Amino acid sequence: MHAGGFAPSGLFYKSSRIFEAGVRNNSVIGWLLAAPLSLVLVVFLVVPIAMIVVVSFWGATEWSIYPAFQFDNYAFLLTSDVTYRVFFNTLKYAAITWGFTLLIGFTVAYYLAFHIRSLTWQIALFLLCTIPFLTSNIIRMISWIPFLGRNGIANSTLISMGVIDEPVEWLLFSDFSVILAFVHLYTLFMVVPIFNTMMRIDKSLIEAAADAGATGWQTLWHVIVPLTKPGIMIGTIFVVALVMGDFITVRFMSGSQSANMGRLIQNDIALLQYPSASATAVILLATVLILIGTLLRFVDIRKEL
Amino acid sequence: MTTISKIRYSRRSLLKTGGAAVAAAALPAPMVWGQETKNITLRQFGTGVSNLNEVAEKVKEDLGFTLEMTALDSDSVTQRAATQPDSFDIADIEYWICKKVWPTGNLQAMDTSKIANYDKIVGIFRNGKLTPESVIAQGTAPHTVGFTSGINGKDFVDEESGYMTLIPTIYNADTLGIRPDLIGRPINNWSELLNPEFKGKASILDISSIGIMDMAMVVESMGEYTYPDKGNMTKEEIDMTLGIFTEAKKNGQFRAFWKSFDESVNLMASGEVVIKSMWSPAITAVRSQGIPCVYQPLEEGYRSWGGGIGLSASLSGMELDAAYEYINWYLSGWVGGFLMRQGYYSAVPETSKNFMSEDEWGFWFEGKAAQGDITNPFGDVMEKAGAVRDGGSFYDRMGAVACWNAVMDENQYMVRKWNEFIAA
């Protein structure tokens, strides 16, 4: 990655020496080379986001939206205590899911990378992890519902084992079921990048740590974890962005009883309140960007990859 | 097939039928008309209740043209009718949706003189009265948004003007669905929905226009408040109504909210919920799994709804003629019989009678005990001999309507408050 990163500028340097008068020409070529990607990004990313920002200041009637420049949408959003509660809820889901996926993801990746000796088995077991992901994530999520229900498999098993007398209600349509589904759905997004960085850790470093008298835990904490940081960060960005933007998992697993920002947006869209939905989306986007910006301050992903 | 011969060429039909139309203009032979009809495709969308493939198949068989069906939930239907007028030819929508969508001009008025069975349409959709003595219920009663001033009208008029916004097709009286086996005592009032006895076992639907009316029925039944007009609440009334339900929600009264048909069926069939606002086909679906479920008539009466067919404003020429033909066919009885055997009512019951057996008519419409097995249109046995329909006859049920699904003047405020209730 390091060598690759320097290659274009090296080429540029060399070629500018050969065509001394061609610097301008080269910058034109540079622009042209960057143009397709920039164009795609402008058309499919910048313009839509700009539209969302613009529409967030518009007004809406029951069946139409009209151009305006008003702060009504933001005012309604920022003065309602429901927004703050929902916002807090969104962050809560993201934080708890992050904790669990990190713990499970790190353990799985660690096992695959350091305890499985042969590359063939590592690849085989890694592919095994991805098998559940060959089905739609909606199906994986919904299949929890009959399992966790009042008369579901979990409750009837617990009752027949004598652990509980009455069905446990909080298994389904609760924060528990929402987070369970999130962890189930998104752990792989943690496993993959962490496994990837762990595989590239030089094994001699671990030997060196052992030779220097470090215990297993010391090696883990002082050698492996710091070297795995970029993978953890990438996994974190995936999980946080996915959980904060989700609406369907929260809707189904909470029985529409809990809400996150995505649910607010979805409700607004269903009720034709596009400007209000846009305003919520802008706030959500800003939050996620700030969050990821903060995360990136801890680790320079580009440098460490 | 007769109306097809009066061809008025529109740009669209010319583009669509192309060469055939040119040939037809030169050689107007009946054979060519028949061929053209086959090439017509009408795109219909609406809520799941009446967007049934069986109807499309029968249309192909009886009328020759193709009907493409798309089923969506109520909010999506409203959204599409209001924002994408060119994406459909026929909108199968509810009357409260019509109140929202009609002012956009995306639908065109229908000339009642072209509707063969217009005179046989039940009074509810014409002057609002089921029988001459009936009192008109609160809410968006279908007749109040059923007529417009002229062919280009954008308004609603009170009298039968000869121009209809929607041609009524289907309607029913809704109430609470209960699991009698899990409740074990009689339920007679809407207020039972918030009875702490059913804490964690109640549910309400998450569609604001309909849910707010169910809530109003509950609030009145609890004796908390009597609305001057449930169908048109003030901001204070909206706050008060949603306040009571938010309180109940925080106390854990509700197990879940439902929005789609399958959610509604599963919540009830799995026993997660024992009492909730429900629609009749969902009751039928639960019962056909062998699980007892009753569409409980309540003292305060029913919350009713009606649906109808509207024509896209961009429909013209042969497609428009085909659409009128479809409407006339719709009211001629086959669809009515099909829908009535699922527990709905037809806008022209007397034509539907010809497509139902005497026993079916007696059970579904007259509220008589079934003589033999009652099957649904798909052949599944729904009721055994001796069973009586929940709520009784057509006149018992539709005569006890307390309110219609509604769109209020303060709808936007209500929608935002509803959103907060769901998020609370």
Image (tube, helix red, strand yellow):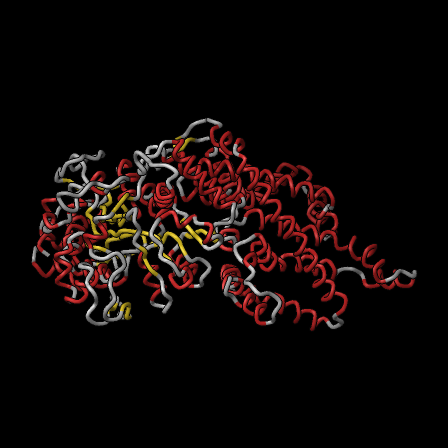
Left or right, B140 with respect to B129, comes to right
Q: Can the viewer see residue A274?
A: no
Task: Place residue A169 in its image quadrant.
Answer: bottom right
Task: Give me the residue at 17% from left, 61% from top.
Answer: B334
Q: Is residue A63 visible?
A: yes
- Looking at the picture, tell me which residue is in the foreground, A113 or B111: B111
Q: In the rendering, at what x and y percent does residue B241 appear? A: 41, 38
- Determine which quarter of the picture holds residue B216: top left
Residue A69 horizontal side relative to residue A6, left or right: left
Which quadrant of the view contains residue B66? bottom left
* Front residue of this view, candidates A144 and B79: A144
Q: Residue at x 12, y 57 (%)?
A: B351
For the N terminus of chain B, the quadrant is bottom left
Query: Which residue is drawn at the image coordinates 67% and 60% (left, top)?
Result: A191
Q: What is the count of numbered marks?
A: 0
Q: Whole-percent x and y of residue B196?
A: 47, 50
Q: Relative to residue A86, is residue B291 depicted above or below? A: below
